Amino acid sequence: MNNARPPLPPFLTKEVAAQKVRMAEDAWNSQNPEKIALSYTVDSYWRNRSAFIQRREAIIQFLRDKWQKEQEYRLIKELWSFSDNRIAVRFAYEWHNSEGEWFRSYGNENWEFDEAGLMQRRLASINDISIKESERLFFWPIGRRPDDHPSLSELGL
């Protein structure tokens, strides 16, 4: 298991599952598709909104396209539930398009991991709402969310 991505399933405690969630959040906030894709199995299967994606190469291309459209992207994920090799997450992220219009996207993800801790299935449902720039809540510099930044629950989202 030289490609293992701890923590490994089964996820037995809330703290361990939350650690896995934070690691995913940090990876996505890096906006580095090649690095992010290493957390997924080679044949990982995604449903993202209405898109169906399979394999790391397709994930990398999907993420490149995503961040061409979704600029100034900042994401917060929060553990919702966990058991065995599965984790459910809720999340929100803020971004703007090329016209400078701001959005907050809300969603839920269901994750399933293999024995090496790689995600083999990701099912995401996401809705976007238009927001004014003055309604933004996520202001840290692009990259990892600071540890002292409020969570979704603390922000009332």
Image: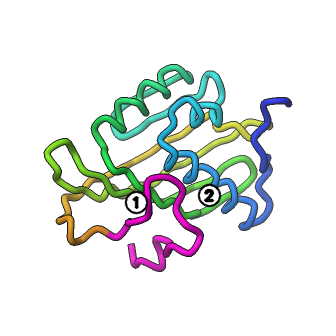
Name the foreground residue: 91 vs 114: 91
- Give coordinates of residue 68: x percent, y percent: 31, 35
The N terminus - image quarter: top right
Colouring used for the render: rainbow
* Foreground residue among 151 and 81: 151
Q: Position of residue 33 (x, y in %)?
A: 51, 33
* Mark 2 neighbour density, 10 Å: few (under 14) some (14–19) many (20 or more): some
Q: Which secondary structure lies at badge 1?
A: strand
Left or right of residue 139, residue 35 in this image: right
- Residue behind mark 1: 92
Residue at (49% x, 27% y) in the render: 60
Q: Which residues are magenta?
A: 137-157
Marks 2 and 1, the one that precedes in the sequence: 2
Residue under the image location 62 percent in, 58 percent down: 22
List x then y, in percent, for residue 125.
39, 48
Q: Is residue 64 above or below residue 18?
A: above
Q: Amino acid at mark 2?
A: Arg
User: Any mark on residue 19, and which?
Assistant: none
